[in-house]
C-alpha cells in the first residue's frame, strides 16, 4: 500500500531563478531531492549549469536576466510547453546595493528594483497565466527580513522586497480561485555570496575571522543564536510548494532564527 507523502514533489515541474548560487542553488537541489524536475535559471549561465549538473538528470539550466521580460516569459512558457505543465516557480534571483538614502544613485535604485521586484513580477505574471489555465500550481517569492525592520543603508533593497511582499499577497487573492497558491519567504541573514562579499579576500576566499566577528552581534538577535544556511530557506520553500501547504497562500514565512517576530 502506498501512502501519499504531502511533502513529496514527485513528477512536479519547477523553475528556480537565481539557481546559480546560495539560496537559489539550495532550493533547486532540495526540490530535486524531493522528486521535482528543476529548470535552473540564472544570469550566470555557467553557475546555473553547475547546479543542474550537480543534480543530474532531473535538472536543466538556462542563462537569463530576470529583469528582461521576454526571456522570462520564453523560459516559463517554453518549460510548460516542453513538460506539459508548470507546477512550481521559485523567484529567488536578487541583488543588493548599499548606500544612505541621501546618497543612493538613481541607477542603483533602478537596478535593484528591476531585478528584485520586476524580475519577480515577470515570473509571477508568466507563471500565473499558465497555472490558472491548468488549474493549479505554487509560486514562492523571495522577500527578506529587511521588510520587518528599518535597516540603515539598504533602502532600495528593502523597498524592492516590501513590493515583493505586496505582489505576493495581491496575486494570491487573484489566483486562489484557480487553485494556485502564492507565498513568500522572508529570510534572515543567510551565509551566501551576497552576504560574504564584505569579507572577500583578494584571492576570492572568505576572511572567516572577519565574518565571525561581524556575525557575533547578529547571532545575539536570534534567540537560537543562529545565522542561516541556504538549506534553511530551501526547506521552507519546499514546504510551501508541497501539498502539505495546500491551506497556505498569501503568507510570508520567516526563516530567520527568530530574529524578527512581527504579527
Ligand atoms: N543571503 C541573505 O542573507 C538573504 C536574506 C534575505 C533575502 N535574501 C534573498 O535571497 C535571494 C538569494 O540571495 P542569495 O543570498 O542566495 O544571493 P547570491 O548572490 O548567492 O545568489 C543570487 C543569485 O541570483 C543571481 N542573479 C542576480 N541577478 C540576476 C538577474 N538579473 N537574473 C537572473 N539571476 C540573477 C546571481 O547570479 C546569483 O546566482 C535574493 O533575492 C536575496 O535578496 C538573501
Image: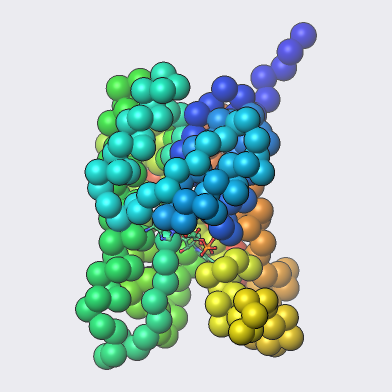
110 left or right of 219 in image: left
Residue 102: quadrant of the picture: bottom left
Residue 218: quadrant of the picture: bottom right
Q: Is residue 26 visible?
A: yes
Residue at the outermost top position = 1
Of residues 100 and 198, the one nearer the viewer is 198
User: In the rendering, at what x and y percent does residue 185 appear?
Assistant: 50, 54
Residue at the outermost left position = 106
Which quadrant would the N terminus be assigned to in this image? top right
Of residues 128 and 3, the one nearer the viewer is 128
At x 46%, y 39%, the residue is 15
At x 30%, y 76%, the residue is 108
Q: Examine the rendered structure and indicate whether residue 71 appears above or below residue 246.
A: below
User: In the rendering, at what x and y percent does residue 100 appear?
Assistant: 34, 88
User: In the rendering, at what x and y percent does residue 11 appear?
Assistant: 57, 22
Of residues 49 and 193, the one nearer the viewer is 49
Q: Is residue 24 visible?
A: no
Q: Examine the rendered structure and indicate whether residue 194 appears above or below residue 5.
A: below
User: In the rendering, at what x and y percent does residue 10 appear?
Assistant: 61, 24
**How many numbered marks does the figure carry?**
0
Of residues 227 and 110, the one nearer the viewer is 110
At x 29%, y 84%, the residue is 104
16 left or right of 203 in image: left
Q: Examine the rendered structure and indicate whether residue 78 appears above or below residue 24.
A: above
Residue at the outermost right position = 1
At x 34%, y 60%, the residue is 115
Q: How is the image coloured?
A: rainbow
Amino acid at each position: 500500500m502506498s501512502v501519499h507523502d504531502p511533502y513529496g514533489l514527485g513528477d512536479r515541474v519547477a523553475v528556480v531563478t537565481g539557481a546559480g548560487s546560495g539560496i537559489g542553488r539550495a532550493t533547486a537541489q532540495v526540490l530535486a531531492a524531493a522528486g521535482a524536475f528543476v529548470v535552473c535559471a540564472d544570469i550566470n549561465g555557467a553557475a546555473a549549469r553547475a547546479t543542474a549538473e550537480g543534480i543530474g538528470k532531473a535538472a536543466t539550466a538556462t542563462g537569463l536576466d530576470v529583469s528582461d521580460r521576454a526571456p522570462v516569459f520564453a523560459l516559463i512558457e517554453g518549460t510548460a510547453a516542453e513538460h506539459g505543465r508548470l507546477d512550481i516557480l521559485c523567484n529567488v534571483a536578487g541583488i543588493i546595493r548599499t548606500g544612505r538614502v541621501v546618497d543612493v544613485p538613481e541607477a542603483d535604485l533602478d537596478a535593484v528594483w528591476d531585478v528584485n521586484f520586476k524580475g519577480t513580477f515577470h515570473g509571477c505574471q508568466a507563471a500565473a497565466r499558465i497555472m490558472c489555465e491548468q488549474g493549479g500550481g505554487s509560486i514562492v517569492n523571495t522577500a527578506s527580513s529587511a521588510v520587518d525592520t528599518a535597516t540603515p543603508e539598504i533602502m532600495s533593497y528593502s523597498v524592492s522586497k516590501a513590493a515583493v511582499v505586496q505582489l505576493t499577497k495581491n496575486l494570491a487573492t487573484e489566483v486562489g480561485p484557480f487553485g494556485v497558491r502564492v507565498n513568500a519567504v522572508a529570510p534572515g541573514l543567510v551565509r551566501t555570496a551576497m552576504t560574504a562579499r564584505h569579507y572577500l579576500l583578494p584571492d576570492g576566499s572568505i576572511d572567516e575571522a572577519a565574518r565571525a566577528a561581524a556575525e557575533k552581534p547578529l547571532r545575539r538577535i536570534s534567540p537560537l543564536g543562529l545565522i542561516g544556511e541556504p538549506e534553511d530557506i530551501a526547506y521552507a520553500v519546499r514546504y510551501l510548494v508541497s501539498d502539505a501547504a495546500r491551506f497556505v497562500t498569501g503568507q510570508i514565512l520567516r526563516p530567520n532564527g527568530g530574529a524578527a517576530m512581527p504579527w
